[in-house]
Image (cartoon, rainbow, N blue to C red):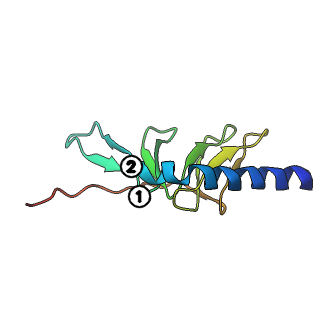
């Protein structure tokens, strides 16, 4: 990737983050697992919840994408940050990319009241 293209991509991701930040802040994703306990699992606030290639739910602090060559789920390191794939299928993320993880997912706790 040449330097001009890298700067253009970074600028585009920055502009998308600015334009769509309020939309990202309002999202909260949860899924019901099909395990014996029918556990509910959620993305962290402003994060993303995705199934990886082995069928497990993984989460990231920001938006996640799947690397088209490796199948790895990568996410923006910024809460509410955007992620995209470049022309080679590699991740481009606001504030850098991190690997999605089961440990970043949260389980809601019922309100006792």
Among the two numbered marks 2 and 1 on one chain, the one whose residue lies closer to the N terminus: 2
Can you tell which mark lies on residue 12?
Answer: none
Residue furthest left in the image: 113
Q: Crowding near pointer 1: few (<14 within 10 Å), some, many (20+)?
A: some
The picture places residue 28, in percent across and down from the top left corner, at 38, 49
Q: Crowding near pointer 2: few (<14 within 10 Å), some, many (20+)?
A: some
Left or right: where 31 falls relative to 75: left
Q: Which element is circle 1 on?
A: loop
Q: Label 2 belongs to which residue?
A: 28
Q: Nearer the viewer, residue 113 or 104?
A: 113
Q: Nearer the viewer, residue 110 or 35?
A: 110
Q: Nearer the viewer, residue 54 or 107?
A: 107
Left or right: where 84 falls relative to 3: left
109 in relation to 29, above or below: below
Left or right: where 64 falls relative to 110: right
Left or right: where 34 falls relative to 27: left
Q: Which element is circle 2 on?
A: loop
Q: Quadrant of residue 90?
A: top right
Give the CA distance from mark 2 to mark 1.
6 Å
Identity of the residue drawn at 58% across and 56% down: 81
Q: Label 1 belongs to which residue?
A: 45
Query: Split into 4 quadrants, where in the image is the C terminus?
Result: bottom left
Q: Quadrant of residue 86?
A: top right
Give the mark count.
Answer: 2
Identity of the residue drawn at 53% across and 55% down: 62
The picture places residue 111, in percent across and down from the top left corner, at 15, 58
Identity of the residue drawn at 69% across and 53% down: 15
The picture places residue 51, in percent across and down from the top left corner, at 46, 40
84 in relation to 105, above or below: above
The picture places residue 102, in percent across and down from the top left corner, at 42, 54
Whether label 2 touches label 1, CB < 8 Å:
yes
């Amino acid at each position: 990737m040449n330097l001009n293209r890298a700067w253009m991509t970074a600028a585009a991701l920055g502009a998308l983050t600015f334009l769509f930040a309020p939309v990202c802040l309002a999202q909260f994703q949860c899924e019901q697992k099909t395990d014996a306990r029918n556990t509910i699992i959620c993305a962290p606030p402003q994060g993303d919840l995705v199934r990886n290639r082995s069928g497990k739910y993984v989460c990231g602090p920001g938006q996640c994408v799947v690397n088209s060559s490796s199948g790895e789920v990568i996410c923006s390191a910024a809460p509410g940050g955007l992620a995209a794939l470049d022309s080679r299928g590699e991740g481009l993320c606001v504030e850098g990319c991190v690997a999605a993880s089961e440990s970043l997912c949260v389980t809601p706790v019922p309100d006792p009241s």
